[in-house]
Amino acid sequence: MTRVLVTGFGPFDGSLVNPSQQLVDALDGDVAKALLPVSYSRAANELRRAIRETEPDVVICFGQADGRTGISVERFAHNLDEASATDNDEEPGSGTAIDPHGPLAYASTLPVDEIVAALHAEGIPAASSRDSGRCLLHPVLFALLRVLGPDGPCGPV
């Protein structure tokens, strides 16, 4: 049986709810779930902890991207600690590389085009994306892809 870990984030920026949290909360069955803090300093460590505890075969990270009208399936996790967004700990990103010795980006190892096609087949608006926007998702996904490596099926949605 394939072990799946699905993550989301709590509310941020004055919102009372985060759709990624609602999605994770609504999942049932044999799916491991983790709610990550909206914190540059804590989110990646919490993700690594969830991976150690659940030992998943597949990891899917959900996030919220304001202004998008459908599901964005991300192709890349950029090596950038976004500077323009402030987290729930009232800390901004540094605006620097997450790993100064790492690559500019890691590619998602999920089948992005196939996921988008499957969502379209169900009548769900979706598109692939190269940038998750100004948010915490880059540091979390960069950490995820560093932990699981180029062969571990994981990626952002």
Image: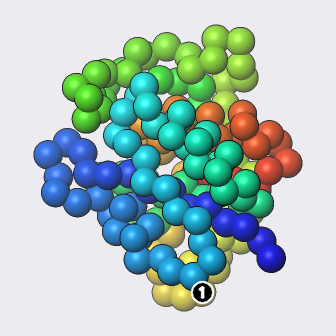
- Looking at this rendering, what residue extends furthest in the right direction? 151
Q: Amino acid at mark 1?
A: Ala
The residue wearing badge 1 is 121
Give residue 32's quadrant in the image. Answer: bottom right
* Residue 148 located left or right of residue 33: right
Residue 124: give x, y in percent of width and height: 47, 80
- The relative height of residue 81 versus residue 115 in the rendered view (above or below) is above
* Left or right: where 13 falls relative to 64: left
Q: Is residue 135 visible?
A: no
- Residue 126 in the image: state x and y as whole percent: 50, 69
Q: Position of residue 22 (x, y in %)?
A: 34, 68
Relative to 111, is 135 above or below?
Answer: above
Q: Is residue 118 visible?
A: yes
Residue closest to the far front = 53
Compared to residue 87, the image places residue 101 above or below, namely: above
- Above or below 86: residue 124: below
Decide which of 89, 117 is in the foreground and name it. Answer: 89
- Residue at the spot 77% in from the left edge and 71% down from the top edge: 2
Nearest to the observer: residue 5 or residue 78: 5
Quarter of the image with the N terminus in it? bottom right
Residue at the spot x=25%, y=35% of the render?
A: 88
